[in-house]
Image (cartoon, coloured by chain):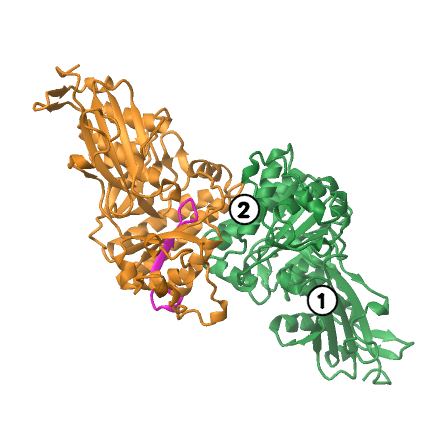
Chain colours: A orange, B green
Amino acid sequence: MASESQNWVLMVTAQTPTNIAVIKYWGKRDETLILPVNDSISVTLDPAHLCTTTTVAVSPAFQQDRMWLNGKEISLSGGRFQNCLREIRTRACAVEDKKKGIKITRENWSKLHVHIASYNNFPTAAGLASSAAGFACLAYSLGKLMNVKEDESQLSAIARQGSGSACRSLFGGFVKWIMGKEDNGSDSLAVQLADEKHWDDLVIVIAVVSSRQKETSSTSGMRESVETSLLLKHRAKEIVPKRILQMEEAIKNRDFASFSQLTCADSNQFHAVCLDTSPPIFYMNDTSHRIISIAEKWNRSEEAPQVAYTFDAGPNAVLIARDRKAATLLVQRLLYYFPPNSDDLDSYIIGDKSIAKDAGINGIRDVEALPPPPEIKDNILSQKYKGEVSYFICTRPGRGPVLLSDNSQALLNDETGLPK
Amino acid sequence: MASESQNWVLMVTAQTPTNIAVIKYWGKRDETLILPVNDSISVTLDPAHLCTTTTVAVSPAFQQDRMWLNGKEISLSGGRFQNCLREIRTRACAVEDKKKGIKITRENWSKLHVHIASYNNFPTAAGLASSAAGFACLAYSLGKLMNVKEDESQLSAIARQGSGSACRSLFGGFVKWIMGKEDNGSDSLAVQLADEKHWDDLVIVIAVVSSRQKETSSTSGMRESVETSLLLKHRAKEIVPKRILQMEEAIKNRDFASFSQLTCADSNQFHAVCLDTSPPIFYMNDTSHRIISIAEKWNRSEEAPQVAYTFDAGPNAVLIARDRKAATLLVQRLLYYFPPNSDDLDSYIIGDKSIAKDAGINGIRDVEALPPPPEIKDNILSQKYKGEVSYFICTRPGRGPVLLSDNSQALLNDETGLPK
């Protein structure tokens, strides 16, 4: 080995956000390289509320590549992990830390094993794109550890091979995944359209919807759509290219009316393609439909749209309010229709709790006292759906990956390289 | 008046079936004439279980056109009623009944008023295309009363102006509504592809699904789809024409595998277009989705498809079983997942009750004793959804309109011309 001692452990810890697509990715033209059939655009979510933290470590003492997810060891044998690891290793550069007596040459990397520990600050099972943040964090942290010179866009093309939407988590703010044209996928990567400060009025409320249904995985779902949906190709070739241009324009101009119209229409069209698949795929349930109706009714009662909605491969609603005022009105509506099952409001509205406070919601009594929204003319028709939402997460557009230099935030022990 | 006495009442009573589209009609190119954007194909349902009976009467004593639906007087002022009445009147021919002393010349018809009484043998509110049977029966019975010489196809073009899908109820068996090319709609009419005896293996089970949602009417729904769905035009121009040819072939050959695949795919695509509409339209609910999953899972576990499903503008499922054996297995599955809320099985399975008997279901105990279907490997995952279905109707493909000559079946009194 390149170093004199076999006892050193070199570590890097990074934090990477998740993201929500506003122009959807659905359908691959290459399953192995994960190359999509159309461009997509996403908003990065504030890592303060939804993120993955990953520590990667290398040591001559490690006998094999190992990984722990949320404290539990998982297999790294899957092709997607192996692709990411291989792609990063081929780009590794020499690293030297004289103080610790570490010297790794470019060639050494192929012989050294890594330990990876990853942790999501939100429930993995909630269907909140944990794999996007996870693979982005893996590519980013390994890239830093191995002194990879490639920029975020180039790293995004590696993260993409772990999980398509992961490539969009290499940047904060507003991100476009360019589908690319090359067969090897080298030009299928993410670029930042604008950072999170460009449009910082937006407030995001996620409704985590209770579900009894077992969902189709997005990997098999999009494969079946590509194979059987007669509408998917038309969407990918004729509709999305125009929408991408319109969405870029809407983001550039902070034009919420266009942003909202495009976001909702594209979410609905993605789910339409799922329904056009054989057998049909249903990700939205009755609760998802109710949330859409609430948003549509409210938007139509106002002079301009107040909220956009979008749903990924599951029933959870991601609601984007035009500004803080709209967000408080949105939270009032959501809590009116979906009061919590218990009195524990503190675990029912998580993330940025100040939105609920601004909405005048400090306890369960405030929820009970909420009047029906004014757009409901016939109060008899307004029903409440207690228990249909598990909880709400209030957040906002956020920054891209960052390194965490504070060793206390590392998930691996810096002497053993094992989970703390 | 043409007759010597003013006291006569001339009456005709007819019975007309409802129908279920297997290639869907969704979108008009002309709202007034009700001209569709694509051809559609339907199966006529047995009038023994689902039909409209209409009595039309004419008398010089009548002061105005009047109509009663299910015993309650309704307004005839709507454009759709007026269009049908006008179109039939312009085609009226002379009628003479020497025994009763009735003589009506061609010219008289424009001065004579009609009374119309119509009755559905199924709940109007159940979302079972009552307007299709209703307008078909109106056109058919008025045509008979007024001695109109036009054939069923020509009458269908009149019924079409009352309710688009009504034109397909002028025939039994398997029916195609040709969209036509003419601006005046003269070639937008129904033709029979095959009568009900051509493929009499098929058994139809309708699940009337309980719903809390208020539904979008199909008239406004299809208008919004035409205006906002980017997928609708592609469907109408590129996809449906091919499907129509394939469906005609499947019906001709009694090829259930193709029939089932096309029926399910076209139902799903119609609902996909609804979802692609702004604001999105949801006709299917979680119960509808569950029924689809049950059918899909079962079909995939067998060598060949056993059942096709199709949904109109509401949550009710129309299930078409390949034969009687498949129908009994279907009923077992449906009752296993959707047991009745009460012990009253007799009002839970209506229509052709012999299917349930053949399935070994004679009472609530038999329902409770049903084992999970063999295609459910993991019994823990099999849930029951009591109360989600209001009732089931067992039926089959059926005949077209008929005249009821037995006066006891007339809905109007033959002396007063008023409802019995």
Circle nearer the N terminus (2, 1)? 1
Which is nearer the eye, A350 or B158?
A350
Circle 1 packing at 10 Å, graded few (<14), some (14-19), many (20+), is many
Nearer-the-camera pick, A327 or A380: A380
Where on the picture, by quarter, is residue B333? top right
Task: Find numbered disc 2 in the image and state the secondary structure of the residue it sits on.
Answer: helix
Chain name for mark 2: B
Q: Is residue A314 magenta?
A: yes
From mark 2 to mark 1, how far is it between C-alphas?
A: 32 Å
Q: Give residue A66's position: percent from left, percent from top.
A: 30, 24
Disc 2 vs disc 1: Cβ atoms closer than 8 Å? no
State left or right for residue A331 relative to residue A148.
Answer: right
Magenta stretch secondary structure, dominant: loop
For the C terminus of chain B, the quadrant is bottom right
> Which amino acid type is shown beneath numbered disc 2?
Ile
**Quarter holding residue A307:** bottom left
Asked if badge 2 and badge 1 are on a common chain, one would say yes
State the residue position of label 2.
B239
Q: Is residue B78 visible?
A: yes
| Chain for disc number 1 | B
Residue type for callout 1: Ala
What residue does disc 1 label?
Answer: B139
Mark 2, other Cα within 10 Å: few <14 / some 14–19 / many ≥20:
some
Left or right: A95 in relation to B313: left
- Relative height, residue A8 to residue A71 (above, below): above
Residue A315, how many percent across, how many down?
Answer: 43, 49
| Residue B48 part of the magenta segment | no
Disc 1 element:
helix
Q: Residue furthest left?
A: A99
Residue B238's spot in the image, x, y percent?
52, 47
Q: Which residues are magenta?
A: A299-316
Residue B402 % position (x, y): 79, 61
